[in-house]
Amino acid sequence: MRWLKQYGIVFSLLFLLSLSACVPYYVKHQQFFAFIRTEQFAQAEQVIASSKKAKKKKNRLLYLLERGHVSFLQGKFSESAAFFLEADNLSESLRKEIGTEILSYIINPNVRPYYAESFELVMMHYYHALTFIELGNYESALVECRRMNLLLQALEEDGEKKRKYTRDAFGHLLMGSIYEATGDINNAFIAYRNAQEIYETEYSDLFKTVLPEQLKKDIINTARKTGFEADALMFEEKFGFKSSSPSAEEKPELILFLEYGWGAYKEASSFDFVFSQNNGMMNFVNPATGIAFNYPVSSVSSNDLSNLASVNVFRIAFPRYVQSPAFFQQGSVQVNGKTTQVDLAQPLSEIAVQSLRDRFLKEMRQALLRFALKKAGEYALKQENKDAGAILGIANAITEQADTRNWQTLPAYINYIRIPLSEGLNTVSIKSKTVQGRERNDVLSIEAKGKRKYIKSLRIISAKE
């Protein structure tokens, strides 16, 4: 009876661990996210800085991204730049490691370090560049632009045929803005033109996001400033409007990125697959969706094949993005008595959903065979020892959890506007309206000089006045 008692203790501990393992990442760090949602950034920083879970090696990249972001939101730009630099270096080194990746195929994706989604890496460069701009270091911001460009090229070149999100229009728009702010008009025009092409193809189709009106003007203006008059005329005809010729005396301008809402978050979902075999193939079919995966019977041993047939049904855990409800429906900017509506530039929540959908079949195929073999071993052990088999079953449940980690403090979408300024102090009023009709008012004060291009971002999460 002593062995039965020992089994009972182990069984209970494993059961409690299984309940803990099922909790999504955002729930495990709900206090941090609660402070972010209410724009209490200093309190959020204290929470994550003292979190042992967030600092674990496998979560280190995510921790650095969140620390860099929350420092940025507080205006601690030097600290933010340091965190994003470490995150950038870590993301590169992680992608060169294959040991933990192989282990994750055998056990669980949660055992591997968090690599970050491709769009999260784009946003890492976005914030890193903005920190340098806030610090007045435009040369470093340009370096960050070039690093973003290399990332975008790598995403496009490495994109599999079935992947749809392989190019990021907003990344090119940001590069164009920074090139223009540093006086590199030629590269600004190229970046804007690249952004335009992606908006009109991938973004309009995948995310229902049209080419921003402001970007149309930016393309024409930079074409003219570069001396590409034929291109300027061609784009005027394409866009259906005439743009005024650049003034001999340029005035200062504000390029403003308004970051609205709360981005999508990951939670676990499950898929049931029914097993069968014929013509030398193992077949796994999800009856609800019709998704099917086939593997040669030679992929497994004869014992495993027999045990798989006995188990028959397999339930696989897989992450899915959940989009937060839309909170703000529109925004406008007023300066020097003129009001302008902002344009949607980056639908981050939709991009998050698509990026996960792009790799669903590939990762599900890997997860399915891995889990099926674990269940086959569990079935075989149960035939020898029912209690030991039950313990192994709980252990398998613990190690087969969906990876629900993600950079969740990102906004749901980013709007974009260019605003002419006057020499001296400018008061920029931003009005945001919620879907319930409530208004929120924010103010930016900018001391404008010469013909400088000022690049700013403003995060708007809650409806506080």
Image: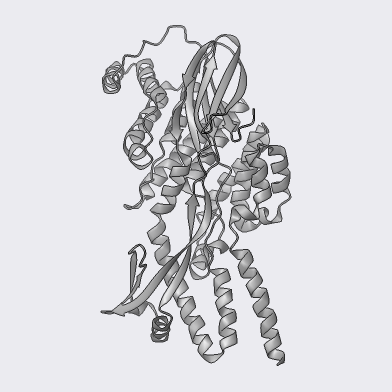
Q: In the rendered view, would you say 388 is above or below 246?
A: below
Q: In the rendered view, would you say 423 is above or below 460?
A: above
Q: Depth check: 395 or 313 in front?
A: 313
Residue 13 falls in image quadrant: bottom right
Q: Residue at x 44, y 31 (%)?
A: 344
Q: Depth check: 450 or 10 in front?
A: 10
What quarter of the picture does the C terminus occupy?
Answer: top right
Q: Residue at x 34, y 64 (%)?
A: 291
Where residue 331 sits: x, y (%)? 51, 26
Where residue 244 sits: x, y (%)? 36, 11
Q: Residue at x 57, y 9 (%)?
A: 423
Where residue 216 sits: x, y (%)? 36, 23
Number of numbered discs present?
Answer: 0
Residue 67 falls in image quadrant: top right
Q: Depth check: 446 or 334 in front?
A: 334
* 385 horizontally vs 216: left or right: right
